[in-house]
C-alpha cells in the first residue's frame, strides 16, 4: 500500500480502510492507498500551517532554488512517473511523457517568476507619504485535483502556490493518487516538512473537510461543475478565496479555406487526445457546408484507423476511458443522439478485439443539432459530433450557444474570420490552427459556467497572493484636516 504524505512523513494517518487503484486498460487492481478522513486533513492542515511561518520568510532566491530542484528531480524520473500515470489513468505513454515534461517546466517557470516582483510602488497621495502594494501569501492552500491530468493540473496549482510563499495540502483524485504520492518521494524530499502534504481519499470524505477547514483560506480546484458548485456553496459563507477550473464543451470551427488533410488530422487530435477526456477537448465540430460531406467521410476514415490499446504499447494511439460509468455516460449521449436522428459514421461500440479495459471506439456522428445532449452537455469521451454551418455569423452563434466558456478552436487562414472569432467567441483560450497547445507564460482558464480562475502566467501566480496597500507617512506631523473641524 502507498501512504499519505503529511508533515514530511509517509503514513496511513487515521485511515482504517483503503481505496483500490485500478488500471483502466486491464481493469485489474494493482495498488491501494489510504481512505483518508477529516482527521488526516486536520493533521495535514496543522502541519502546513506550522510550516507557513518559516516558508513565507524563505528568501526568494533560496525558494527559487528549491523549486528548480523539484523540476530537475521530476525530469530525472520522467520515465518512471510517466509509466505510473499510464497505469493509473490509461492514456498513452507518449502523452504522459509530455505531461511529466509540462510539470517539470511549470516548476522551473514559477521558480523564476516567484522571485521577480512582490508588488508595486505608487506615486504618493501626500508629499510625506510612501505608498506601496505588497503581494503576500495567504497561508495554507488546498489543492483539489481531478484524474485526467493528475500531475499537470497539480503543478499548475502547486508551483505558483509555493512560489508565492504559501504552504499546501493536496487532495488528488481517488482514481489517480499514485503519481502524486511518488512525486513526493522523488522530487519534494528536500522541502521543509509540512510545506507540501498529500491526503488521499474520496471527495466527500477528504476533499470536503479541506474545503470546510477554517485554517485553509484558499481552495484551488479543478473538476466538474457539480463539484465546483458544491465547493462554492460551502466556501461562500466563510469568504474563502476560490479558484475554480470547471468543465467545458469546446467548439471547433473548420473554415471553408482549410487544407482538408491538415484539418481532419487536427480535429481528430483535438477531440480524441486522452480518449476525449480533456477539459478542452473539441466536443462540437462545426464544418463549413461547402466541405461538410467530404470532411465527414475523411474524418470517419481517419478515425476508424486509430489504434486502441494499452497505453504502454508504443503503437497505441488511444487508451481506455477511466472507468465504465464514464464510458456509459458517453454511450448514453451517443444513443440518445441516434434515437433523435443522428447517424454514426464510425465507432460508437466497445472494441471487440479488447476483452478487458474501459475502451470505447472513437466515434464520428452527423445529423446532430443543439437540442441533443451530445451538443449541449460535457461528453468527456471519444466522440466527434459534426454539424454544418453556412457562414461565419452562424459559426460564431453556434460556438457561443453553450453554458461553458473554456476554450474554442478555429481552423482558417482568413484573417478576417480569425479576428472576428477571437473577438466574438466567449472563451478563456482561443486556438487558431493548432488546437490544445500550451504556453505556460500565458493564462489558462474559463468564462461562464467554467469558472473564472486563471492558471499559468503571471495571472496564475497572482491567484495565490493577497494584496496589501501600505500608506506610510514618514514625517508623522500633526495634520490640519484632523479634529477638531472648523479650525
Ligand atoms: P470531480 O469534480 O468529480 O472531482 C475532482 C476532484 O474533486 C477529485 O479529487 C474529487 O475527489 C474531489 N471532490 C469530489 N467531491 C468533492 C467535494 N464535495 N468536496 C471537495 N472535493 C471533492 O471531477 P473529475 O471527474 O475528477 O474530473 C473531470 C472534470 O474535471 C470534468 O468536468 C472536466 O471538464 C474537469 N476539468 C476541468 C479542467 C479545467 O482546467 N477547467 C481541467 C481538467 C478537468
Image (tube, grey):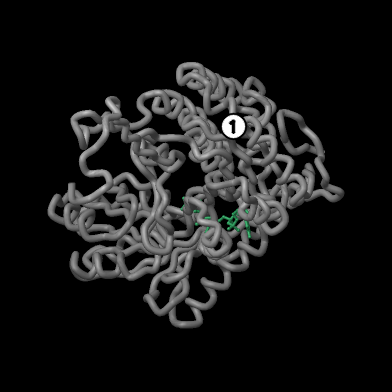
Q: Nearer the viewer, residue 250 or 270?
A: 250
User: Could you tell me residue 98's position as x and y percent?
Assistant: 50, 34
Q: Judging from the image, what secondary structure is the residue with disc 1 in?
A: helix
User: On the picture, is 417 further left or further right than 42?
Assistant: left
Residue 16 to residue 250: above or below:
above
Residue 15: % across, % down: 82, 47
293 vs 372, left or right, is: left
Q: Nearer the viewer, residue 294 or 379?
A: 379
Residue lying at the far right in this picture: please name it: 16
Q: Nearer the viewer, residue 133 or 349?
A: 133
The x and y percentages for residue 83 are: 64, 34
Q: Is residue 361 visible?
A: no
Q: Residue at position x 40%, y 79% from top?
A: 371
Q: Specify few, some or many for label 1: CA neighbours under 10 Å numbering under 14, 14-19, or 20 or more.
A: many
Q: Residue at x 59, y 46 (%)?
A: 216
* Displayed-image quarter of ligand 1: bottom right
Q: Quadrant of residue 457?
A: top left
Which residue position holds label 1?
52
Which picture quadrant has residue 452?
A: bottom left
Residue 188 visible in rendering: yes
**Image mark count:** 1
Q: In the image, is residue 437 above or below residue 252? A: above
- Quarter of the picture holding the N terminus: top right
Quadrant of the rendered image containing residue 472: top left
Residue at horizontal 48 percent and vertical 21 percent from the top: 64
Q: Residue furthest bottom?
A: 340
Looking at the picture, how far across and down is residue 245, in whole percent? 47, 53
Note whether 321 is above or below 40 in the view shown: below
Mark 1 CB within 8 Å of ligand 1:
no
Amino acid at each position: 500500500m502507498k501512504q499519505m504524505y503529511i508533515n514530511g512523513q509517509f503514513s496511513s494517518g487515521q485511515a482504517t480502510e483503503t481505496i483500490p487503484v485500478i488500471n483502466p486498460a486491464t481493469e485489474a487492481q494493482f495498488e491501494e492507498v489510504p481512505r483518508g478522513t477529516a482527521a488526516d486533513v486536520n493533521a495535514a492542515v496543522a502541519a502546513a500551517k506550522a510550516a507557513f511561518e518559516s516558508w513565507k520568510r524563505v528568501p526568494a532566491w533560496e525558494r527559487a532554488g528549491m523549486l528548480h530542484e523539484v523540476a530537475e528531480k521530476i525530469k530525472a524520473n520522467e520515465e518512471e512517473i510517466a509509466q505510473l500515470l499510464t497505469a493509473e489513468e490509461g492514456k498513452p505513454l507518449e502523452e504522459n511523457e509530455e505531461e511529466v515534461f509540462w510539470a517539470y517546466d511549470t516548476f522551473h517557470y514559477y521558480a523564476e517568476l516567484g522571485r521577480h516582483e512582490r508588488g508595486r510602488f505608487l506615486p504618493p497621495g501626500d508629499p510625506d507619504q510612501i505608498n506601496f502594494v505588497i503581494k503576500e501569501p495567504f497561508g495554507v492552500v488546498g489543492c483539489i485535483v481531478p484524474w485526467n491530468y493528475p500531475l499537470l493540473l497539480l503543478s499548475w496549482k502547486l508551483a505558483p502556490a509555493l512560489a508565492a510563499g504559501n504552504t499546501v495540502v493536496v487532495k488528488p483524485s481517488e482514481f489517480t493518487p499514485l503519481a502524486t504520492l511518488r512525486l513526493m518521494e522523488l522530487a519534494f524530499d528536500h522541502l521543509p516538512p509540512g510545506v507540501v502534504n498529500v491526503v488521499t481519499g474520496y471527495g466527500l470524505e477528504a476533499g470536503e473537510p479541506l474545503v470546510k477547514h477554517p485554517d485553509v483560506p484558499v481552495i484551488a480546484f479543478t473538476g466538474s461543475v457539480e463539484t465546483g458548485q458544491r465547493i462554492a456553496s460551502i466556501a461562500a459563507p466563510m469568504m474563502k478565496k476560490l479558484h475554480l477550473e470547471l468543465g467545458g464543451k469546446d467548439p471547433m470551427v473548420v473554415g471553408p479555406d482549410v487544407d482538408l488533410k491538415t484539418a481532419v488530422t487536427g480535429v481528430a487530435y483535438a477531440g480524441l487526445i486522452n480518449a476525449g477526456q480533456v477539459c478542452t477537448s473539441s466536443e462540437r465540430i462545426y464544418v463549413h457546408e461547402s466541405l461538410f460531406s467530404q470532411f465527414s467521410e475523411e474524418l470517419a476514415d481517419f478515425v476508424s484507423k486509430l489504434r486502441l490499446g494499452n497505453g504502454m504499447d508504443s503503437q497505441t494511439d488511444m487508451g481506455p476511458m477511466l472507468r465504465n460509468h464514464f464510458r456509459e455516460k458517453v454511450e448514453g449521449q451517443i444513443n440518445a443522439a441516434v434515437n433523435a436522428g443522428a447517424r454514426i459514421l464510425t465507432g460508437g461500440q466497445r472494441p471487440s478485439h479488447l476483452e478487458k479495459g474501459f475502451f470505447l471506439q472513437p466515434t464520428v456522428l452527423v445529423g446532430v443539432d443543439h437540442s441533443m445532449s451530445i451538443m449541449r452537455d460535457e461528453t468527456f469521451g471519444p466522440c466527434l459530433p459534426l454539424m454544418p454551418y453556412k457562414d461565419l455569423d452562424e459559426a460564431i452563434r453556434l460556438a457561443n450557444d453553450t453554458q461553458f466558456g473554456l476554450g474554442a478552436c478555429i481552423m482558417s487562414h482568413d484573417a478576417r474570420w480569425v479576428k472576428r472569432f477571437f473577438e466574438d467567441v466567449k472563451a478563456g483560450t482561443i486556438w487558431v490552427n493548432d488546437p490544445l497547445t500550451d504556453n505556460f507564460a500565458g493564462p489558462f482558464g474559463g468564462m461562464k459556467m467554467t469558472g473564472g480562475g486563471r492558471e499559468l502566467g503571471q495571472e496564475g501566480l497572482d491567484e495565490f497572493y493577497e494584496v496589501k496597500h501600505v500608506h506610510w507617512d514618514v514625517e508623522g506631523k500633526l495634520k490640519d484636516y484632523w479634529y477638531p473641524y472648523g479650525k
